[in-house]
Each structure stands twice: as C-alpha cells, then as structure tokens.
Image (tube, helix red, strand yellow):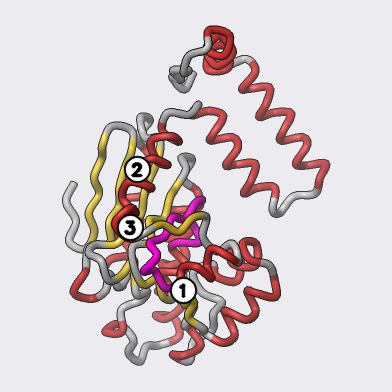
Amino acid sequence: MSFKNILLEKDGPIYTLTLNRPERMNAISIETVPELIQALSQVGDDADARVLVITGAGDRAFSAGADVADMVRRSAPEAAAIVRMYLDYIMAIRNLAVPVIAKVNGVAAGGGCCTAIACDLRVASEQARFGFVFVNAGLTAADMGATYFLPRLVGFGRACELLLTGAVIDAQEAERIGLVNRVVPHDELDAATDELSRKLAAGPPIALRLTKEALHGGLDKDIASEFQFETYAQTLCLVSEDHLEGAQAFREKRAPVFQGR
C-alpha cells in the first residue's frame, strides 16, 4: 500500500514507518494523520509483525509536529474533530501489541515529541532536540497525550517545566531526565536502532506482548488488579511452547527460537 506523506516498509518481522515530508521537517499535517492511522492498523493486523520503528526522513528532523500551514481560523466543532483525530493517532501507537521504537534522527517538536513519547522506547541521535513547544504558539500542552505520557516518563516536576515553558532541550539532557532511553552518535543511529529492533524481534512474542500490556495497564491500576493481570499473563506464558523452548535452549546453552505459540 502506498502513501503520500509517509513510508511503511517491512523487513522480515520489523516494520519501519517514516514520516516522509523532509521539506516540511516531517510535519504531521492534517492530511498525514489518516495515513498514519491506516499504516498503524496495517502493522497491527499483521500476525508476523514483531517490532515497529517510527522515524523521520532526512537528517534534520524526526518531526516538527503539526504543520503551520494547517493553523488557520476554524469553528470549535471543526477544531475539536481535528484534536480528536490526532489523539486517535497517538492511541493507535499506544494500542499496538508489538514494541514500538522511536528513532529520533533530529528535531522533535510539539506533536513530534508526542509521537516519540507514545512509543515504548526511544533511541536518539546526539543531534536530536526535544521541545513541547505548544505554549509558544498559544496552545495548551494538553495535546496528543503530552500531559499523560510525559509525567510518567520524567516525573511531574520535569513535565511541568517542559510543558509550561516550551523549553527545547538537547539529546544529552533528554537522556539524563529519562525522556529517551539512549543517545548515540548520529552516524550510529541506524545501527543502534537496528540492533535493538532485531533483539526485540527475536524475543518471545507472547511474553513481550503481555509485558507491554502489563507495563501500560499497570500505570492506571491498583496493585491488586495488577497482580490479577500478572497471574493471567504468566499462566499463559508458562503453558506456551515458547516457554518450553526457552527452558530447553537454556539447558542446551543455545539461543532460543521463539514461534509465538
């Protein structure tokens, strides 16, 4: 399936979704959002998918966020529908069963930052910059999940500072406060992301899916509910063929070959 503003490529069990508007710093225009939702649905429907990597085309930007060209006067109902559509895009990332990696190759601003923090893991180039710059455009930072995800990543105080000031931070500071998992030299970004994605793709699909579900769900559950889910999840894994394969591989001192069964 071809798209106008994005690329969706598959290499074995690994998908790469590229925001492909480098002339606009990979801005996520209103026209782009339905394409993103459709691409994410395609990944979710593929039983052979194991990992998704989201990145931006070129070396300048991961994504500059919403397209300034779309920022025109609108009626309240029209504006509300647009806000909801962007949130549906973020929810589509969150709801994917497979691990999602943001490969942050440059500037991530506004909705670009929100895309990155909606992913499970973030690997950033040393050239990357991060800014939740909504307030600089007279917009609330309560947009595209920023006020939900960011405090859970960096803590309430740091989130307040970044969202209320619209400050832009470099990759090293982003790593220090926990906004990204790893920063690498720019020319090593592809290799570092490939290594991580292949490691995840080789992992046990059922166990990874349930671990991801527990991590996200646990943020909003009480301890009793979380323990109930852990009982369910680990029981499924204990009776799976992947668990038997993992145990046998450990005894035979070899790498396991997981089948998702």
Instruction: Indicate which disc residue 5 carries.
Output: none
SS label for mark 2: helix
Q: Is residue 125 magenta?
A: yes
Specify the segment rendered in magenta: 116-130
Type of amino acid at the residue the image marks with label 3: Thr
Residue at the spot 75% in from the left edge and 41% down from the top edge? 226
Mark with earlier residue (3, 1): 3
Where does residue 37 sit, x and y in percent of width and height?
A: 35, 56
User: Which mark sits nearer the N-terminus, 2 or 3?
Assistant: 3
Label 1: which secondary element:
strand
Disc sitting over residue 194 in the figure: 2
In screen coordinates, is 177 left or right of 257?
right
Instruction: Note whether residue 10 is visible.
Output: yes
Q: Residues within 10 Å of mark 1 (few under 14, many from 20)?
A: some
The residues bearing labels 3 and 1 have C-alpha atoms spaced at a distance of: 18 Å
Relative depth, front residue between 176 and 246: 176
Q: Give how far apart the Cα atoms at labels 2 and 1 are.
A: 23 Å
Q: In the image, what residue occupies the spot 46% across and 20% down? A: 258
Amino acid type of the residue tagged 1 in the rendering? Asp
Checking the image for residue 55, the label placed there is 3
